[in-house]
Image (cartoon, rainbow, N blue to C red):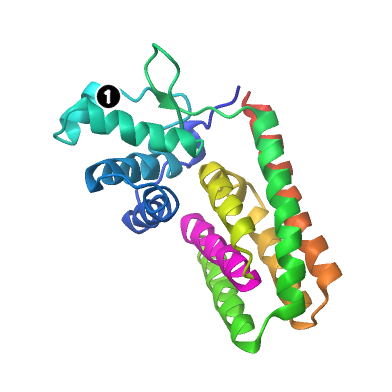
Amino acid sequence: MVKTARDTGSAVTDPRSFERAKALVHRIVADRHDRPSLVAGIACEVGAEIIEGIRQAGDDLNSVELSRRFATSRTPIREALMLLEKEGLVDVPPRKRPRVAVPDLQDIREIYRARAALFELIAVDVAKGVSEEGLARLRHAFAEMQASYRAGDVSAFVWANVDFYDQNTLLANNRTVKRILDSLLLRTARLRRLSLSQPGRMERSCDDHARLLRAYEDRDATLAAALIRSNHINALAALEAYLTRAA
């Protein structure tokens, strides 16, 4: 089992990044499940804290403390944590205190390989059918990534990266694959900052995405699929190297 170390810079206090994390959890968790607004709000808040590294892998989630914090009974807390458990952010073992999920290295490998395979399908569809308006949206998202890289802002780069891939899934117009990728996104969101904060990773990621954008512009589906897979495998390799050292 592996944990994200607190001294890696993964814990983020930037309020803009935290609001982005809350919005992501709301889009994927709260909008997907029909739950009262209180339950959804708790899930979004706790989920964002996990994604941003404020709550670390393996940390206890004390329902008594959470019920006091949110001024509610323990029932909405349990419901919120169960929503997050379905998305892989929380572990609720029987007769034990809930905790932030701790994925092992094999789980991470499986998730990243699944995302790589699914995004290959997405890249082929985008390359074959993207319009000029769609390319403009991708160029805008990539420009945000470049600006964040030049500013050395890992948090901003992470969310620009999320936006870039979200545009890919929207342009491919494959709702089934998008639902699967959205669920996997929550499982990888807290790891993505860790990967991109490794030395040289933002620069490499920028280069990879510049090449991917050119492949889209050239309508080269084969190259686009290979590049988008390579980007995911490179991210996984960076995580494997770091987590192996940390373990």
In the figure, 144 relative to 91: above or below? below
Position of 189 compared to 221: left or right?
left
Residue closer to the observer: 11 or 1: 1
What is the magenta range?
153-172
The residue sitting at 60% across, 76% down in the picture is 138
Q: Is residue 76 above or below residue 218?
A: above
Q: Is residue 161 magenta?
A: yes
In the rendered image, the vertical position of residue 179 relative to residue 82, given as above or below: below
Describe residue 122's horizontal placement relative to residue 167 as left or right: right
Residue most extreme to the bottom: 132
Foreground pick, 220 / 183: 183
- Residue at 41% x, 50% y is 25
Q: Residue at x 49, y 60 (%)?
A: 159
Name the quadrant containing residue 51.
top left
For label 1, the residue is: 63
Q: Amino acid at mark 1?
A: Ser
Task: Kindly indicate the quadrant of the structure image that contains residue 177.
Answer: bottom right
Q: Which residue does the image show at 36% across and 32% down from the upper left?
A: 81
Q: Residue furthest right?
A: 222
Q: The residue tagged with tag 1: helix, strand or loop?
A: helix
